[in-house]
Image (cartoon, rainbow, N blue to C red):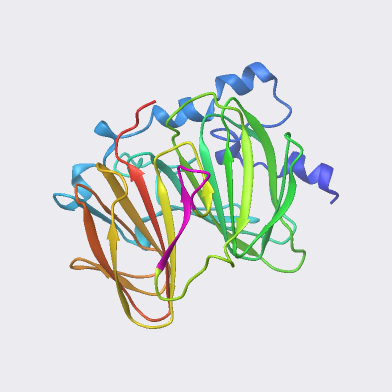
Amino acid sequence: MDRKNFIKKSLVAGIAGTLIPSASKSSDAEKETSTYDKLIDQVGFNHIPNHKEVKTMNTVYHAASTRGSANHGWLEAKHSFSFASYQNPDRMNFGVLRVLNDDKIAPSRGFGTHPHDNMEIISIPLEGALEHKDNMGNGAIVQHGDVQVMSAGTGITHSEFNANTDKDMKLLQIWLFPNKKNVTPRYDQISIKDIQKKNEFYQVLSPSADDQGVWIHQDAWFSLGEFDEDTTSHYTINKKGNGVYAFIIEGNAQIGTQALSIRDGFGIWDVDDFSIKANKGSRILLMEVPMQITV
């Protein structure tokens, strides 16, 4: 099947009907299905985790096995928070962190052209490479070792496909509510190879273009860590009131008394700092985000 015909058939009902409208719809219809409006209507009270999942006063644990899931043949997805056909009132968001999807995309398959607005979108390939195209003229291959960001702002359209013809690709897709709406859309990606460190966390995203890594329109800081030996790290909150959602990409770790395994998520807030023990062979993403949505 050629790419043009595939794009017409690739939008699955659960995603297409909720967050990824068909490219054939009118601009008026696209406005009616605003990404920001649909997701902001679903967030939890005070934008913090539902009390049913809180283990202590300021932490929440999401075991990998409790995530939502969807299998569309070409796409296998795990949802840490409610998304498309997976709707769980106890799992809507962690502060401004609204979407954390763990996707596996079949060779040469992907998402046809679709719109977004007023969201900060971060993609982190875990295996393989992603082919990206958008209406701003960007065309790029985003591969393992890269971090990609898009500020959707007033509106963008883009497509994403597995760039490989012979193997699956895996990636994390992360959406944050912005701290300002209707900004000029922008795209950026970087290779983290020059800033990557072993056995310590290193920053890959921040609110400032002058800082290390990519930047977004939100007071958020992301850090990655790859560990080939047992290591205890100390993390200090960058902005008072922020919380941190830790996602264990590979291996095992521990925050406080909570043991964490591969693909587990753990949120902590109302603290100034905390320690995290990373075991040998682990890879961990720390997402520091505001706990209140201000826009």
**Quadrant of the image for the C terminus?**
top left
User: Residue 120's x, y, as percent?
Assistant: 51, 39
Q: Residue furthest left?
A: 57
Determine which quarter of the picture holds residue 20.
top right
On the rendered structure, is 187 left or right of 219? right
Which residue is located at x 52 percent, y 68 percent? 196
- At x 35%, y 70%, the residue is 261
**Which residue is nearer to you in this view: 16 or 202?**
202
Q: Is residue 2 above or below residue 166?
A: above
Where 141 sits versus 262, above or below? Answer: above
Residue at screen point 51% across, 45% down: 215
Q: Residue furthest right?
A: 2
In this rendered view, identify the residue nearer to me: 264 or 144. Answer: 144
Q: Position of residue 175 (x, y in %)?
A: 48, 42
Location of residue 287 in the rendering, given as x and y in whole percent from the top left corner: 39, 52
Report if residue 135 is visible in the image: yes
Q: Determine if residue 49 is in view.
A: no
Task: Return the x and y of residue 12 as percentages of the image width and height.
Answer: 62, 42
Highlighted magenta segment, given as a residue range? 201-211
Q: Where 32 falls versus 20 (above or below)?
A: above
* Residue 257 placement, left or right of 15: left
